[in-house]
Image (spheres, rainbow, N blue to C red):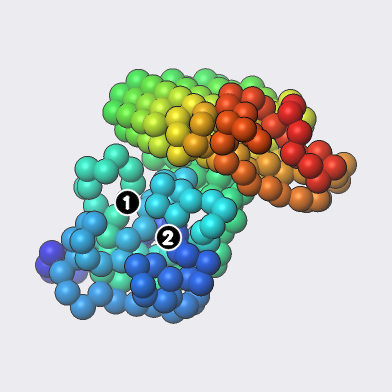
Amino acid sequence: MTDSTDDQTPAPVRAIKGFNPDLTCRGFRFVEGQTYEHPGQVSLCNSGFHAVTLPLDVLRYYPAPRSVWHDVELEGVVSGGSGGDSKVASRKITIGASVNLAGLVKAHVEAIWDQVKRPSKKNAATTGYSAHAATTGYSAHAATTGYSAHAATTGDSAHAATTGDYAHAATTGDSAHAATTGRYANAATTGYYAHVRASVSDQGAIAAVLGQGAAKGALGCWLVLTERDDDRNILGVQAMPVDGKQVKVDTFYALRGGKVVEA
């Protein structure tokens, strides 16, 4: 890759990068607040600093709960990979603040909004490859069926559903459900009420309830459950694999009184 000779320098790209708990990635240790520059050619999946522009995609490479994630700024970006997600490589990277799982969900919703230019209609549906759907209204649903096509909602009682591979479903409103059936597709909701649901149906996916509610998944999935008090303060968070024994397949679980129980 050669640098552009245009007078205008492209603006830095905001992305999310995953790390091991000690802030290492492929043996290199990063420091928050520092900027790093790759001296040679940048090639996706081969060289340079890698990150994802759709936040939930980071879980494919650095899954919960054994990873940490940071907001980063990238310069000299190379994209266009065939992996089915938003991974990019860059010449230069600045390590920003850490982001928790709830932050990933909210950032993912914002990223989808930017791609679909914040639609105003109450319901959105797409079927194309990498065709995203996003809604912001009360009871406004979003659904996608395309490969790598994401659905995101922010309104109360606003559901998100996807069926394509690598297609995530994310919601931030109360009483808002998130569900996916595609491979490598995660479902996350920050809704507060007990009937909120997050579900995934393919091995290796994550169903996360970051407000209060219940989650279920297929064998090999991970569930992330949160318990909150009446003032929405966090009382506890637990992550567990769906192993078919202690945590049964296709069964909703919730965190109540510090214990994981069937919902």
Element at badge 2? strand
Q: Is residue 160 above or below residue 221?
A: above
Question: What residue do we see at 57% from left, 41% from top?
Answer: 241
Image quarter (top left, top right, bottom left or bottom right) of the C terminus: top right
Q: Quadrant of residue 155?
A: top right
Q: Is residue 146 above or below residue 80?
A: above
Between residue 28 and residue 246, name the one nearer to us: 246
- Horizontally, residue 239 falls left or right of residue 57, namely right
Asked if residue 202 can be seen in this view, the reply is yes
Q: What residue is pinned by disc 2?
A: 17
**Three-letter residue code for mark 1:** Lys
Question: What residue do we see at 21% from left, 61% from top?
Answer: 46
Q: What residue is pinned by disc 1?
A: 87
Work out whether mark 2 precedes mark 1 in sequence or the reverse, and give the earlier one: 2
Q: Position of residue 249 (x, y in %)?
A: 58, 27
Q: Quadrant of residue 204?
A: top left
Asked if residue 144 can be seen in this view, the reply is no
Q: Residue furthest front?
A: 245
Q: Position of residue 132 (x, y in %)?
A: 40, 31
Image quarter (top left, top right, bottom left or bottom right) of the N terminus: bottom left
Q: Position of residue 196 (x, y in %)?
A: 69, 29
Q: CA distance from mark 2 to mark 1?
A: 10 Å
Q: Which mark is residue 53?
A: none
Within-10-Å neighbours for mark 2: few <14, some 14–19, many 20+: many
Between residue 164 and residue 248, name the one nearer to us: 248
Element at badge 1? strand
- Horizontally, residue 244 falls left or right of residue 2, namely right
Q: Is residue 129 above or below residue 88?
A: above
